[in-house]
Image (cartoon, helix red, strand yellow):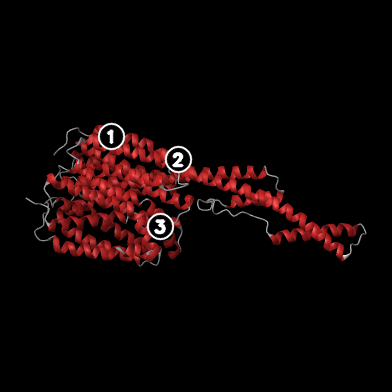
Amino acid sequence: MNIMTMKKKLIILTLSVIGFLVILDTNIMNIAIPEIQSGLHVSLTDLSWAINIYTILFASFLIPFGRIGDIVGHVKLLNIALIVFAIGSMISGLASSLNVLLIGRSVQSIGAAIMLPSGMILGFRQVEKDRRNKIIAIFAATQALGAALGPTIGGFISQYFGWHWVFLINIPLVAIVLTMNLLLLSMKNEEVKKIKIDLSGTILIAGFLFLLTLSLVEGKNWGWISFETIGCLVSSLLLFMIFLYHEQHSSEPIIPLKLFKNRNYVGANVVILITFIVMASFIGIIPTFLTKVIGVSELHAALLITPMSITLLFSTPIATKLVGKVNSRVLVGFGIIILGIAVYFMGHLNLKNSYNQLYLVDILLGLGIGSIAGPAMSIAVGSLEGTELTAAQNVLNVVRNIGVIIGIALFLSLLDGNIDSAKQNVHSYATDRIEDSKLPKTVQNKMINRVKENDSTSQINSQSIKLPQIGTDQTVKLAKTQTKIIIGTKSDAGIILPTKIKQQLYQKVLIATQNKVKTINHELKGIFKDVKQHIHNQLTDAFLKLYKWELPFIVCGFLTIFIFKEKQYK
């Protein structure tokens, strides 16, 4: 029996586009932030909430809305969610103030939190359980692709069409998807479950995820040991403990806890968390490194990491097809090892002469993530049905999202610390280098002040510090001043110089001044060349040594493979 008819293929294609859109919108606006900031006249701190609100609400409502779909019907709920998502995109795209943008992003996130779980469940229903791996591979690849291509697509749209279209582009795409849904998926006689909504469990899990993601997203700004951050983390932990107790005694739990008795399911969640921490640290940090340190444009930076997306698109379905044929420990272990190699090269990038090392990292990351993401999801939910399937894949989606949040929040915080250390090192080096020179004290002080003025991530960039050369006008002014002093001294001694002698004296002083200025400028050039190179080296080290912190994650990921059972379903 040919289960993949043309109609079903179109359904799968449509649903995979939905997953792509949802994940894409988690980071598509990141690279357009400078343009949005200028357009709305807001601070970077305030604007960051337009990203954070989507992330926080999306993570908070994934599990509750997934369960509602089982009760009212996933087709109906998905179509409503698409309309909500489009409305949110329109509000965001037409926003003329930050508050309107925040409202739009909030509406978007609610639509997205419904679209992702309902779309995946409907996709699983298109094939028998033993053919589900293909659907999982497609969804895993397109969703990971959405995360990876966000900066590229966002950069292209904002550069050529303006930042408004970063959001408005969703509207025609949603219109196409909604039309396909109405043509292909019937809302009549839809399969639903006669179960009660676990209202208490829903509130508890939503509250837990909201406070957890809020603390992770804002911890960098609040301070990781601030009252706000600690308060959110402790409160989220308390809600989680109450949630676990409640679910153990609930007749209709929103997350059946027996899922976590399955070693494969636990292992899959852990490796997906680690994988997306690594992926987020690359996507969130490397484009900034390329723009601030290497000096490429935002769009060019996004294009330089695109090969990862292409590799991911091909490696995910291939790896997922091997589930059931290759031992899961071997399959996931291979992916972890490849990730480890990629992380090593990330920490030792040398882009002085070419981008070949970066392309290698792109390919290794795409291969490693693809070898883990699809197979892990397949191993986790491949044999589940009904409400257990809904709950299981919702938890996996949340874990992936938390991985992205941790990856960005943790490594941006570490980067801030590294940048601060780099600034101190640069200031110390520059001061010592200048004070050891033979330059006049006034010139030394001017140079030291110039270096100290450059006190931000963007300004400390070696390209931003301008060489304070002594120009022709200044040289002439110095010569005239020195000539006046000499003439004044002579006059005080009762010696009046003729005009011709004064002119000759000026020419003599001018030549001497020009020679002295030439020597000073030459030394200035040498000092600044050294300082700029030191700045470049310090910034490079500040970014790349971050990836040494990923070693514990890689080790944990490798140890996790022993959680998986050796024998797999077929």
* Residue 48 showing in the rendered view: yes
Circle 2: is it few (<14), some (14-19), or many (20+) Cα within 10 Å? some
Task: Check disc 2 and report its element: helix, strand or loop.
Answer: helix
Which quadrant of the view contains residue 54? bottom left
Task: Point out residue 345 in the picture as x, y percentages from the top left corner.
Answer: 40, 40
Instruction: Tell me the quarter of the image containing the C terminus.
Output: top left
Which mark is first along the chain, 2 or 1? 2
Q: Looking at the image, is mark 3 or mark 2 nearer the viewer?
A: 3
Q: Nearer the viewer, residue 275 or 188?
A: 275
- For mark 3, what is the residue? 299
Judging from the image, what secondary structure is the residue with disc 1 in?
Answer: helix
3D distance between C-alphas at marks 3 and 2: 24 Å
Residue under label 1: 560
- Amino acid type of the residue tagged 2 in the rendering: Lys
Q: Residue at x 23, y 53 (%)?
A: 116
Upstream in sequence: badge 3 or badge 2:
3
**Residue hosting label 2:** 545
- The reply to whether residue 377 is visible in this rendering is no
| Towards the viewer: 145 or 473 | 473
| First-in-chain label (1 vs 3) | 3
Q: Is residue 114 left or right of residue 532?
A: left
**Label of residue 151 in the image:** none
